[in-house]
Image (cartoon, rainbow, N blue to C red):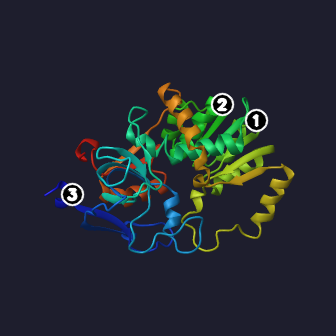
């Protein structure tokens, strides 16, 4: 009897749709048999799972840029896995792959949305962070959409998170002055002392709007937006004429209920700023930019090898702890990229 025949496949499924902030009771841990690969399929053993803010939106019903998770279905999410058995040409047992197997121990794949993990390039967890979708989000949003120039001021929200920490370093590589915004003094210290931000500010400071203005005497040329809320309110008056604002998230509003559009008083005010300052604001979804993946991997891989980009994975052990780790991440409890280590790499079979 094979190891997979003896094992069970644990799965974390969506038990109910949350109202406001999700709770652990919105998830359910189930177990079932490990699937067997059919022709053109391979069986993957999950090593690491990614937990990301976008998953909160996938828990809701209704239209969005991506389908909702169905009740009783496995939670979506990126993964790094080891191939255990393969009937798919080009893949053999022992291969490491990155894909979207969701919150479960084992998954079948036909190779769609799968890429190989090269442990010589970086440790496997990095393929969910610095070399994964979060790194690509930072790369596309900053370089393709904002295109900051040396000497310009770049402000970064959620700067100690998975995407923000990459943006801080990429903007520094471009020769920009970086103003990083985070949620604690410890995170601000990390941004200054480790990642090289010129200024790091705690948005919980009651004087945050004033300290932000003082930190940006020449205004803000690029604002990398993934938060919304009070941070955006403080940044908006400081944006220079022609400022660029790539928008990849609005985590401050993900638990809001009702109509996500701004109220009747705030929208005209926002549009007046857009018009008067000739702002260029562009929302983007990283999945629309996968054509940039080869260039991104080549450049980011080089910067990682040279030590010019640092990556930090905030790892929580145990599939069963994914719901609590996800909720904590939404509250800002992570530093860098939050991952779940489902099983140690050397215990996942080959």
Q: Secondary structure at mark 2?
A: loop
Q: Residues within 10 Å of mark 3 (few under 14, many from 20)?
A: some
Residue annotated with mark 3: 4
Q: How many marks?
A: 3
**Separation of marks 1 and 2 at Cα, in angstroms:** 20 Å
Rendered image: mark on residue 174: 2
Mark 1 or mark 3: which is in front? Answer: 3
Rendered image: mark on residue 107: none
The one of 161 and 84 positioned closer to us in this rendering: 84
Q: Quadrant of the N terminus?
A: bottom left
Which residue is at a point 37% across and 68% down the rendered structure image?
13
Residue annotated with mark 1: 217
**Separation of marks 1 and 3 at Cα, in angstroms:** 61 Å
| Residue 80 visible, this orientation | yes
Left/right placement of residue 86 relative to residue 133 reads: left
Eyeballing the image, is 113 above or below 132? below
Which of pointers 3 and 2 lies earlier in the amino acid sequence?
3
Picture quarter containing residue 105? bottom left
């Amino acid at each position: 009897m094979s190891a997979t025949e003896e094992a069970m496949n644990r799965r974390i499924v969506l038990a109910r749709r949350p109202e406001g902030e999700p709770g652990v009771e919105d998830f359910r841990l189930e177990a079932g048999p490990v699937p067997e690969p059919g022709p053109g399929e391979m069986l993957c053993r999950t090593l690491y799972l990614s937990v990301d803010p976008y998953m909160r939106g996938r828990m809701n019903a209704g239209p969005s840029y991506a389908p909702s998770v169905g009740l009783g279905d496995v939670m979506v999410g990126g993964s790094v896995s080891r191939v255990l058995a393969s009937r798919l040409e080009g893949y053999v047992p022992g291969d490491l792959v990155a894909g979207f197997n969701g919150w479960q121990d084992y998954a079948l794949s036909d190779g769609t949305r799968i890429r190989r993990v090269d442990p010589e390039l970086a440790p496997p967890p990095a393929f969910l962070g610095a070399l994964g979708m979060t790194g690509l989000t930072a790369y596309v949003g900053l370089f393709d959409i904002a295109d900051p120039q040396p000497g310009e001021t770049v402000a970064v929200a959620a700067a100690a998170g998975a995407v923000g920490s990459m943006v801080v370093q990429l903007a520094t590589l471009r020769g920009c002055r970086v103003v990083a915004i985070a949620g604690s003094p410890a995170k601000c210290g990390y941004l200054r002392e480790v990642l090289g931000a010129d200024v790091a500010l705690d948005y919980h400071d009651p004087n945050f709007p004033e300290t932000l203005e003082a930190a940006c005497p020449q205004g803000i040329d690029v604002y990398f937006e993934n938060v919304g809320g009070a941070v955006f309110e403080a940044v908006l008056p400081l944006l220079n004429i022609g400022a660029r604002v790539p928008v990849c998230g609005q985590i401050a509003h993900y638990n809001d209920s009702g109509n996500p559009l701004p109220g009747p008083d705030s929208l005209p005010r926002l549009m007046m700023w857009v018009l008067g300052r000739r702002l260029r604001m562009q929302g983007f979804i990283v999945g629309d930019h996968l054509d940039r993946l080869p260039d991104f991997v080549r450049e980011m891989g080089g910067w990682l090898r040279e030590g010019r980009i640092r990556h930090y994975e905030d790892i929580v052990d145990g599939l069963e702890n994914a719901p609590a780790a996800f909720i904590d991440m939404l509250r800002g409890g992570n530093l860098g990229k939050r991952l779940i280590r489902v099983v140690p790499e050397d215990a996942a079979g080959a």
